Amino acid sequence: PTCIYCSLHSNSLPIRLTMSEFSSLLASFKQNAATASSNPPPSSRSPSRPTQQTRKRPHPSSNNSNARSSPASFPSFHTTRRNKDFQLSFLVIGAQKAGTSWLHTLLQKCNTNDHNNHHGRITLPREQKEIHFWDWHYRKGFDWYVRQFDFPPRKKSSCRTHDSNSLFYGEITPCYIVLPSPAISEIHKCFPNLKIIFVARDLVDRAWSAMIMELRDQNLGLQAGEFADGTFDKRSDSNTKPVSKRAKNSTSTKISVAQRRRLEQQSSPTAQPDSYYLERLRSETHSSRSDYATHLRNWYNHFPSESILIVDYRDIESNPRDVLLKIVTHIGVEETEAKTFVENLSEEDVKQRVNAATNTKSDNVGKNDASIQMAPSQHSLSQRPHLRKQMEKLLRPNAVKFNSLLKEKGYSWKLNEYNI
């Protein structure tokens, strides 16, 4: 074979290689270079940037090691907190897409601003519906949590009981249903008399609604599995108002007609095939939130049954005043006063449907509102019977488990078990 002379030298002596030897040496150089570029030394690696996935709601079974996930042992606020006179009266822990925004709006209306009338005033967080303290923001400390409420320091607050002169502090964060046991245990240690409310919606309808919201959120810049409700600005400190991530990322001021039309098309349920929704339904985000029974049992392990109220979502549609009365009395407001609250609400207030995702009322959407709005027919799962059947098949075991829990706890109603 023809020889070539390399310009490589060793000990000042020229190296003579055959063509095959040179080819082999060149291949070796390329392989070594590729290995070095894919594994740079630690000192040369650029620091990783935080991604939006740090906003993903951590689940108890998650292997995600992000900084917001709950630790194996939760902080002992019950022994270290300074605001021991602050008593949380209630938590609405779910379910997501099950009327919790409607409930939040009406509980705000039940709260009187008349300081001469102390009839069981219900006090919610100042700035927004979902605080996410017990899953996302517990590292900010208990004082930060208390500051989210209009809580005045009181010298004799230890004498406060749940009577007609009480202030009933509470919050609504639907993600709390999937809190891990250490977090629930700490909540009970801090507030042993806490009342828990959970609104249960048909599993298929709830999951479909959640996936539609998620699809829209993705077109507004969030990752699959992320939900913008209740997130706070990372830059916020204890004195900064919470800022919804949706409020920062969405086109919340002025958008053109063409931009609006494009967003509506991209966010339409018809834009995705059945396989997309089935894959999302099997994901940890949606499968976990659809397992009502397993997560509720975690709460029952720490709170007595009489402290937990499970509400049928269908009753919100058929008997909204009765549902509100049941919830308000469960919180601790005396029945006569609760009836006064509910009776004073207008029919329009009680029957309106509020969408927390856009912070709009379904019967009063402004023409210049930049929120994405779609026709009801586009949301309908009835137009995709095959997809619905597949979702029913996947969620039937969860429905059966939940109905078993309802029967065990003395409830006479049950969810659809999708007899396939």
Image: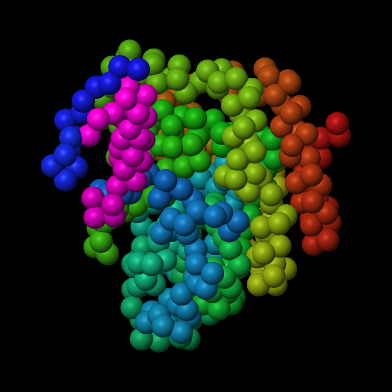
Instruction: Please state if 25 lies on the left or on the right of 179 as rendered.
Output: left
* Residue at 69% across, 70% down: 301
User: Which stretch did the figure color magenta?
Assistant: 15-44
Q: Position of residue 251 (x, y in %)?
A: 30, 29
Seen in the picture, residue 409 relative to 14 is either above or below; the reply is: below
Magenta residue check for 386: no
* Residue at 74% across, 39% down: 395
Instruction: Please state if 56 lies on the left or on the right of 347 as rendered.
Output: left
Most common secondary structure along the magenta stretch: helix
Query: Which is more toward the observer, 300 or 353?
Result: 300
The N terminus lies in quadrant: top left
Query: Which is more toward the observer, 194 or 174?
Result: 174
Residue 118 in sight:
yes
Query: Which is more toward the observer, 35 or 19?
Result: 19
* Residue at 57% across, 41% down: 97
Q: How is the image coloured?
A: rainbow
Seen in the picture, residue 299 relative to 47 is either above or below; the reply is: below
Residue 195 in sight:
no
The C terminus lies in quadrant: top right
* Residue at 72% across, 55% down: 293
